[in-house]
Image (spheres, rainbow, N blue to C red):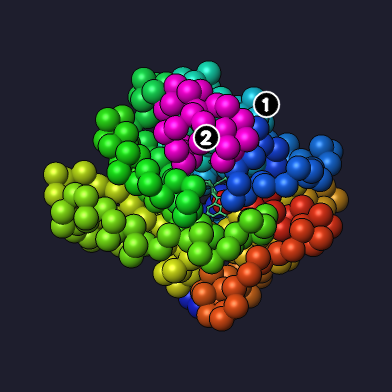
Amino acid sequence: MPVLDTFGRPLRTLRISVTDRCNLRCHYCMPREEYTWLPREDLLSFEEIVTLADLTASLGVDRVRLTGGEPLLRRDLPRLVSLLAHRPWIADLALTTNGVQLAGAAGELRAAGLGRITVSLDTLRPDRFRRLARIDALQQVLDGIEAARRAGFTGLKLDTVISRGDNDDELVDLLEYARDVGAELRFIEYMDVGGAVAWRPDAVVSRDEMLARLADHYGPIEPVPAAGSSAPAERFRLPDGQTFGIVASTTRPFCAACDRARLTADGVLLLCLYAQHGTDLRRPLRAGASHDTLRRLIEAVWQGRADRGAEERLRLRDRGVYIPVAALKKDAHLEMHTRGG
Ligand code: SAM
Ligand code: SF4
Ligand code: SF4
């Protein structure tokens, strides 16, 4: 029986950030020049990660997504994949990556037991990629997607954050590309999460606007009924049968069904993407707390969970940048690239 929070939401999904480092500087996530990184000695070992994942599993988790920063920067990641893939409780093991180093890693990840891959891809134009991510790496990402296909990953997903004036003229091109590579694309509304210090309300292209623009191009778009999942994306079907998703986190938050906890690379448990505080599990773990003590700690924080960050943001009249740079500089845990998206 999974543990329930104050709104009756079960704990089912754990997103594990394996590093806070990244090799891109996406404009909506890491727009600044300087960042303070987590101290290396604070990073959880793979064995520590598995111990904590096991404890969450005893409370209901059966789905794990590895993320970052850029998870492929974590040395020896396939070993962690293999450890997790062999846990008896795991029903779904997925990875979210920017794809830059995927070409060299896809085969090994598949062999290690990774189930699914999501690649973030915001543009198909090399010059634009360079401007939006500050590194010239589009071809590497496209090669990574190809390599993931060749390695046998089915159910490949592509995640695209749409922002006005940056890439909202590529909705159709990106869908066509997804069709060509046999992936399902998900458009993500630009969110005002910590770290998104360049966010402004008019840069958000809403789900409704995206659908209207796509319908103008393709004709009538049908919703695909959700099969009882807590997945954040609403799915749709184009007249030719191609499906895609929209994650309307900003204009239509889905907090009511949110079953996700996040573990940062240094062992802080966060219960919401917008949470301003987390629970440090690394210290008690390293101080020798028993598994039962740790399990009861996790259970108690989940039972006390009342987070509905995106819904609360939506209610604000004047919605500016969520966390100012000064606060981000003081606490890296407030950054999206530390909590993993
Ligand atoms: N580096 C990996 C990647 O980009 O796929 C994994 C970590 S990244 C933080 C996870 C996801 O968060 C990415 O798909 C990214 O597009 C999304 N993300 C980051 N900042 C965002 C923002 N301000 N609004 C919406 N999505 C955001
Ligand atoms: Fe971009 Fe992901 Fe890196 Fe953030 S963590 S800068 S979204 S690649
Ligand atoms: Fe879950 Fe928080 Fe996102 Fe709402 S804002 S869906 S509670 S992570």
Question: Which residue is nearer to you in this view: 242 or 90?
Answer: 242
Q: Looking at the picture, tell me which residue is in the foreground, 35 or 288.
A: 35
Crowd band around label 2 with a 10 angstrom C-alpha radius: few (<14), some (14–19), many (20+): many
Element under disc 2:
helix
Report the side of 174 relative to 336 (left or right): left
- Specify whether 248 is left or right of 269: left
Which amino acid does the dot numbered 1 rest on?
Arg
Residue 126 at x, y = what percent? Answer: 49, 29
**Residue on which the image places disc 2:** 129
Label 2 amino acid?
Phe
| Residue 21 placement: quadrant | top right
Percent x, y of residue 56: 59, 55
Compared to 78, does 61 lie above or below?
A: below
**Residue 51's spot in the image, x, y percent?**
66, 45
Query: What kind of element bears circle 1?
Result: loop
Indicate whether residue 72 is drawn in magenta: no
Q: Which residues are magenta?
A: 118-145
Instruction: Identify the residue at image location x=84%, y=57%.
Output: 330
Whether label 1 touches label 2, CB < 8 Å: no
Q: Nearer the viewer, residue 1 or 241?
A: 241
Question: Could you say where residue 290 lies in the image, as x and y percent from the top left?
Answer: 76, 54
Residue to which mark 1 is pinned: 75
103 w.r.t. 64: above or below: above
- Point 44% across, 69% down: residue: 251
